[in-house]
Image (cartoon, helix red, strand yellow):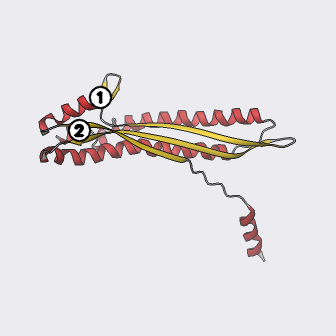
Amino acid sequence: MRLIILSLIFLFTPIVIAEPIIEQDTTYYKVKVSSKEKLLESVNHASPIRENGKVFHGYTRFDIRWRFNWEKTAKRCRLVRVKTILQLKYTMPELDSDSQQVNTVWAPWYSKLLLHEQGHGELAITFASKIEDALKSMRPQRDCKTLSDDANTVAYKIVEQLNKASAAYDVKTNHGETQGAWLHSHL
């Protein structure tokens, strides 16, 4: 009898799993180089990624958007549908070289650079899930405007936390250097 009751509870209890929609894209910039000695200079010259006077070889841009619908009853307003969308856009180099020496250096370096950038992406996925969880667990409010304002405030605070976590990740790894993502360490 208890098994039937437990089964009925699970059957009629909505299970909400927070899964943001993740859209990923990679833009490549061409690096044309014929010798290992010119590799670093060529990547630096080709890279469109510049920040505070520094050149970077890879970049992860993230944009999190959320939408929700509410349901108004006589005394309460509650969220009934939540949708969180994470757009991840990676900018990475693409090698154009016939040199075996260049390819021998490129392959292990590129995999480390990609790993570092994917670390930024994983952080964004984690924080997009936090937004989804937070919005889905919002308590009903007396009116829908208050609920909407509170939901947006919560989501924006989580985006701020993501920005701080991403910056801390770059500090901790020295923009990927500790992960082997700096090209000069492979030359």
Using the rendered view, name the quadrant where residue 130 is placed. top right
User: Disc 2, disc 1: CB below 8 Å?
Assistant: no
The quarter of the picture where the C terminus appears is: top left
When the figure is inspected, residue 4 is found, relative to residue 96, above or below; the finding is below
Identify the element where label 2 is drawn: helix
Query: In the rendered image, which residue does mark 1 sit on?
Result: 55
Which amino acid, mark 2? Leu
Using the rendered view, name the quadrant where residue 65 is placed. top right
Residue 60 at what x, y percent from top left?
40, 38
Locate residue 133 relative to residue 73 in the image: left or right: left
Residue 169 at what x, y percent from top left?
41, 38
Task: Please give the label number shown on residue 183.
Answer: 2
The residue that appears at 60% across and 51% down in the rendered structure is: 18
The quarter of the picture where the N terminus appears is: bottom right
Locate residue 82 relative to residue 29 in the image: left or right: right
Residue 179 at what x, y percent from top left?
31, 44
The residue that appears at 87% across and 42% down in the rendered structure is: 74
